[in-house]
Amino acid sequence: ANHRSLAWAIAQQLRVAGASLCLTYAGDRLKGGVEELAATIPGTIVLPCDVTDDAQIDAVAHTLGERWGSLEMLVHGVAFANKADLEGSFLATSREGFRLALEVSAYSLVNVTHRVLPLLEKHGAGIVSLSYLAAERAVPSYNVMGSAKAVLEQATRQMAYELGPKNIRVNAVSAGPVNTLAARGIRGFTSMHKDHAERAALKRNITQEEVGKAALFLLSDMS
């Protein structure tokens, strides 16, 4: 989404390690920002990919198949929920809001992986997605996104079981609170961020760079 995104932090670490990159964006509203980031890393491919549109996912797979022939790493940094479903009562989550949050934030990991699988299985690969503690515990104002993260983590385990024989590893990074665009959509995040720093063993919050390095480890053969 922008320079604070964990997906961008991961991309930077992958580039340092020598990877060629493809960044995707959902919709014209995000296109310009992603293109600006991509321009700082020569050779980076930028493609549209709304994960609710199978045709766009297939187009990405086709383009990368022609240009690269295979994929060694896949980063799932996608999540979305309607603002009203994060600000109000969890019990008042609409049927459509629940469906949308789970489709974009969890099912997309399964669907995208399935559609690019021929590229991933050629040489083995690493897949990483981004989770959060709300998958396991109740977190104020996280609401339906906590449900989505719980599904994401179950999908991670199921996919790891199914794809392991193909030499494809699947992991999720459950990072602490980081000041990203997504985090700012959570009511009370500023206080949570401060409280976390006071209670953490290191007495500070984590950084985007540290999340990027953790993902690099999981994506690479170091893990």
Image (spheres, rainbow, N blue to C red):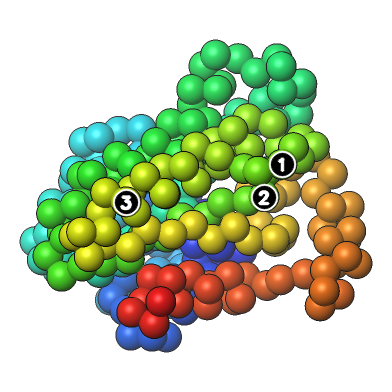
Q: Specify the quadrant of the image occupied by residue 144.
A: top right
Which of the two marks, 2 or 3, is nearer to us in this view? 3
Q: Which type of secondary structure does the marked residue at label 1 adopt? A: loop
Q: Position of residue 177 (x, y in %)?
A: 72, 58
Q: Quadrant of the C terminus?
A: bottom left
In the displayed structure, would residue 210 be above or below residue 113? below
Front residue (pair 35, 14): 14
Q: Residue at x 49, y 26 (%)?
A: 100
Q: Mark 3 is on which residue type?
A: Tyr
Q: Which residue is mark 2?
A: 133
Q: Which mark is residue 137?
A: 1
Whether residues under marks 2 and 3 lie with C-beta atoms below 8 angstroms apart, the answer is no
Query: Residue 195: where, in percent of width, then height?
Result: 89, 58
Tell me the mark number nearer the camera, choosing from 3 and 1. 3
Q: Amino acid at mark 2?
A: Leu
Give left or right: position of 104 versus 132. left
**Residue at x 52%, y 16% (from the top left corner):** 96
Place of residue 104 in the rendered image (x, y in percent of width and height, measured from the top left): 45, 36
Quickly name the residue at label 3: 161
Kindly indicate whether the residue at mark 2 contacts the one at mark 1 (C-beta within 8 angstroms): yes
Amino acid carrying mark 1 in the image: Arg
Looking at the image, how many numbered discs can be counted on the residues? 3
SS at mark 3? helix
